[in-house]
């Protein structure tokens, strides 16, 4: 397959990735899906999860929470509430956040918002997973 | 004629004020740099989002989602005006510009009631004194502005709109154009104007596949769009505030410098006059 994709990942505060890549995998709301150049136009919502993109032989991981992806044959735009590149994640902080989230969802209390607690735990887990990828790849 | 000591005291007072205005100018300048960076960084998201939304909105009928609703369906519910002002003064005409724009907006409504949502202490105080219909207020959010603040405002605004307690929502804020220039903008937030934000005819070719359905995506995208618009307005306003304060304080420092020069000149003249008078006294005393 000839051609490449322009991937840009933006969050409300800033644009975090703007690169030309060969392949992308996204955490769609209905399951992970891969995108290669020449993909049919697609608009998808994303859930909390990890996204990766491949440039040549190298894979890069990004943690994503709640967003949208607009896929065009030569371009992919990801709008995410939260996005963090693996290289930017601080492993110790990610793990601390995970421990906190686990703690919170385990101790039941009256004012616990289950939905939010679960989402927080999900995010924390994803960050740790993504950060681990960064460590094995570097 | 004022005595030398009086003038000297005034010079000292003006100099002290000048030191304060200079310091405020520096602080505003450094904050401005940070705020400006945030505005610039936040623009791509807002633009991309507007772009995606446009592509989507062009393909669905306005009736598909309440936030897109046609203008004719407003009824006689009041217009909700979100006014973004600063928490602090000493920034030139920044706050009065935005409140003035809000007041003239009210006049333009020709009898339709206007309710307010106030962001920033200055605007809140101003409209509180005027006993208007205030639906929401928040202050002291600048300086540590987060998306959550915008989200909170968006939630209130959307709620008001969906429950038909507001027929239209507009946003008034200071836009950051350049450091020397701020401009008050009043723009419609809800219902979301067709072709919002981007150039028309920019819709991507062909139809999309949707995952999940177009309706579901729209239902998630639209509230986020509102959030992002508000967030951008807040960031713009913050940058504009610091820019306005910097310019105002710069002018104040310069005025203080002029005043010090004038006073010093005057003081020297007074001293000269005093010396001359004393000499004359001594000379005329020696003659007799």
Image (cartoon, coloured by chain):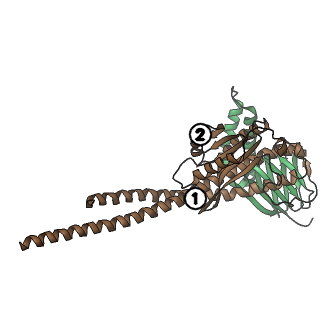
Chain colours: A green, B brown
Pick whichever, B169 or B229, lies toward us.
Answer: B169
Mark linked to residue B130: 2
Q: Locate the C terminus of chain A and report the quarter of the image it occupies.
A: bottom right
Write down the chain letter for disc 2. B
Answer whether labels 1 and 2 touch (C-beta < 8 Å).
no
Mark linked to residue B243: 1
Disc 2 secondary structure class: loop
Write down the chain letter for disc 1. B
- Vertical side of B64 occupied by B287: above or below: below
Give the crowd class for mark 1: few <14, some 14-19, many >=20 residues within 10 Å.
many
- Lower sequence index among marks 1 and 2: 2
Residue at 59% x, 39% y is B130
Residue B101 image point, x, y percent = 64, 51
Is B37 on the left-hand or right-hand side of A126? left
Closer mark to the observer between disc 1 and disc 2 = 2
Report how far apart the C-alphas of labels 1 and 2 lie in the structure: 28 Å
Pick whichever, A5 or B246, lies toward us.
Answer: B246
Q: How many marks?
A: 2
Residue A65 visible in the displayed image: no
Mark linked to residue B79: none
Residue at 32% x, 66% y is B266
Residue A5 image point, x, y percent = 85, 62
- Vertical side of A119 occupied by A85: above or below: below
């Amino acid at each position: 397959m000839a051609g490449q994709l322009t991937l840009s990942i933006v969050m409300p505060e800033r644009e975090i990735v703007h690169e030309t890549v060969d392949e992308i995998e996204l955490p769609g709301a209905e399951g992970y899906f891969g995108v290669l150049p020449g993909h049919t136009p697609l608009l998808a919502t994303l859930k909390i999860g990890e996204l990766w993109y491949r440039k040549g032989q190298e894979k890069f991981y990004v943690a994503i929470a709640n967003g949208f992806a607009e896929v065009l044959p030569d371009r992919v735009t990801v709008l995410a509430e939260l996005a963090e590149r693996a290289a930017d994640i601080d492993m110790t902080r990610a793990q601390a956040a995970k421990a906190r989230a686990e703690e919170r969802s385990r101790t039941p209390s009256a004012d616990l918002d289950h939905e939010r607690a679960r989402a927080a735990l999900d995010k924390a887990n994803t960050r740790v997973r993504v950060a681990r990828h960064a460590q094995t790849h570097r | 004629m004022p005595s030398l000591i009086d003038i000297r005291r005034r010079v000292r007072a003006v100099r002290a004020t000048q030191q304060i205005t200079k310091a405020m100018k520096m602080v505003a300048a450094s904050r401005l740099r940070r705020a400006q960076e945030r505005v610039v960084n936040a623009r791509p998201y807002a633009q991309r989002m507007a772009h995606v939304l446009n592509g989507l909105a062009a393909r669905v009928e306005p009736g598909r989602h309440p936030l897109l609703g046609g203008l004719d369906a407003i009824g006689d519910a009041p217009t909700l005006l979100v006014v973004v002002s600063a928490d602090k003064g000493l920034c030139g005409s920044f706050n009065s510009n935005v409140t003035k724009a809000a007041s003239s907006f009210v006049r333009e409504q020709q009898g339709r009631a206007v309710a307010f949502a106030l962001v920033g202490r200055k605007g809140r105080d101003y409209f509180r004194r005027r006993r208007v219909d205030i639906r929401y207020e928040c202050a002291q959010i600048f300086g540590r502005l987060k998306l959550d603040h915008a989200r909170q405002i968006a939630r209130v605004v959307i709620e008001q709109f969906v429950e038909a307690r507001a027929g239209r929502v507009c946003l008034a804020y200071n836009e950051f154009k350049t450091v020397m220039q701020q401009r008050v903008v009043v723009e419609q937030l809800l219902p979301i104007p067709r072709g919002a934000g981007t150039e028309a005819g920019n819709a991507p070719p062909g139809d999309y596949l949707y995952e999940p359905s177009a309706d579901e995506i729209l239902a998630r995208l639209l509230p986020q769009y509102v959030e992002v618009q508000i967030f951008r307005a807040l960031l713009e306003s913050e940058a504009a505030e610091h820019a306005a304060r910097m310019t105002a304080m710069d002018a104040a420092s310069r005025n203080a410098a002029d005043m010090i020069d004038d006073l010093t000149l005057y003081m020297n003249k007074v001293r000269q006059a005093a010396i001359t008078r004393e000499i004359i006294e001594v000379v005329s005393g020696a003659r007799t």
